[in-house]
Image (tube, rainbow, N blue to C red):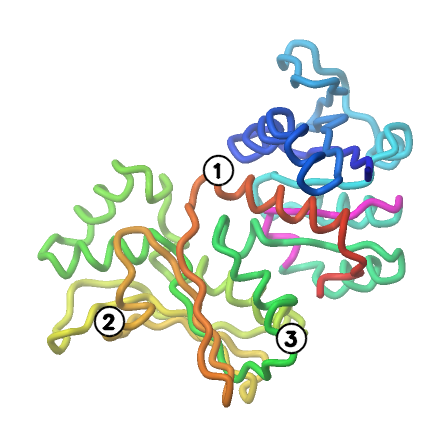
Amino acid sequence: MIDVPIVLAGFGPVGREYAELVASHRAQWRDQHGVDLRVVAVRGRSTQVEVDGVVPSREQWEQLEPLPYLLARTGARVFAQAVPSDGSDQPGQDALQALGQGAHVVTATKSHLLTHWSRLNEVARRAGRSVRISGATGAAMPAGDLARSVLRGFDVEAVHGCLTGTATFVLDQLAAGHPLDAAVAEAQRRGIAEADPTADLSGADAATKMRLITGLLWGWDVAAVRVEAEPIGGPREIEPGHRLRQVASARRDEPGLVRVTVRAEPAGGPLGALVGPEKAVRYDCGDAGSVTVSGGRSSPRGAARAMIKDTIGAALEATAGLR
């Protein structure tokens, strides 16, 4: 049995789901996988709490202590990050400190992966620890796993993906004759789009996820990847049997470039066949053909499940670094 004490950073929707899953499925994962996952502490912006089973209410949390002290005192094997991508440097510094203390890093936070990619990989390899990012590349859709390890030896030539459920839903609403504002409002009403959908509509979110995938797939430095993104605008004419999709793409023979375009995809193809907020990624593998992964819920629960998968993988698989 492998004991896996976890320090969790962030207790918003994803963090709460993660902690609840660990508490409710602990016995199941001990039996199935031989790992004993347990959250031993939770950290917020300025307070923290040690945990023995159920996370105490915020009123019982205490002042934040330096992360290295907490990791050393609790013997944490995994540092799990479910904090917002707000552009601050703190998530990156925390991840580097955790690796330095001998903990694996599991993260659903994107911002510090874009700014600290090479440094995280270097420190993780030196420490013999892994950085797992499934929750940042597609929530419950395991696109990151294919890029990181499953397609090793497949000589992937290109990758194309519909990576935001908001974009897929809005484009189908536009095709049905609804104006853009109404399409976005309906996506927000259904809980598909965030309060500020700018990153989804501009292509920025799809580009971020594709940048991370290229880093896992080809070892590109995601901080240096250039982005050309086409925003979603009004409806346009397309030929019958096709659907408009926001597609993020990268090619191995165009290193360091990610493109996001709004283009017509065959309705029977893996990207054109998506419905509502579904997502998919297609890997073009040359003489091995194409491999597509689709589905997976875009929700706090889906992201938390991806983090759980990564936590178990970090404990069981002898890999170091981001790849």
**Does the residue at mark 2 contact the one at mark 3 (Cβ under 8 Å)?**
no
Residue 122 position, x and y percent, is: 82, 64
Front one among 242 and 142: 142
Which of the 4 image quadrants contains residue 37?
A: top right
- Tally of marks: 3
At numbered mark 2, what does the secondary structure look like: helix, strand or loop? Answer: loop
Q: Nearer the viewer, residue 42 or 134?
A: 134
Magenta stretch: give its range: 101-113
Which element type, helix, strand or loop, lies under badge 3? loop
Residue type at the position of mark 1: Pro
> Could you say where residue 179 lies in the image, as x and y percent from the top left?
14, 53
The quadrant of the image that shows the C terminus is bottom right
- Is residue 225 visible from the viewing direction of this image? yes
Mark found first going from the N terminus, 2 or 3: 3
Pointer 1 local density, CA inside 10 Å: few below 14, some 14–19, many at least 20:
many
Q: For mark 1, what is the residue?
A: 300
Q: Mark 3 or 1, which is nearer the eye? A: 3
Q: Residue at 54% across / 31% down in the picture?
A: 17
Q: Is residue 237 magenta?
A: no
Q: Which residue is mark 3?
A: 152
Residue 228 visible somewhere in the drawing: no
Query: Quick one: label 3, few (<14), some, or many (20+) residues within 10 Å?
Result: few
The amino acid beneath tag 3 is Arg
Asked whether disc 1 touches disc 2, contact meaning CB atoms under 8 Å apart, the reply is no
Quadrant location of the N terminus in the rendered image: top right
Residue closer to the observer: 24 or 143: 24
- Please report the residue visible at 26 percent of the width from the left and 74 percent of the height from the top: 265
Can you identify the residue that label 2 sits on?
Answer: 268
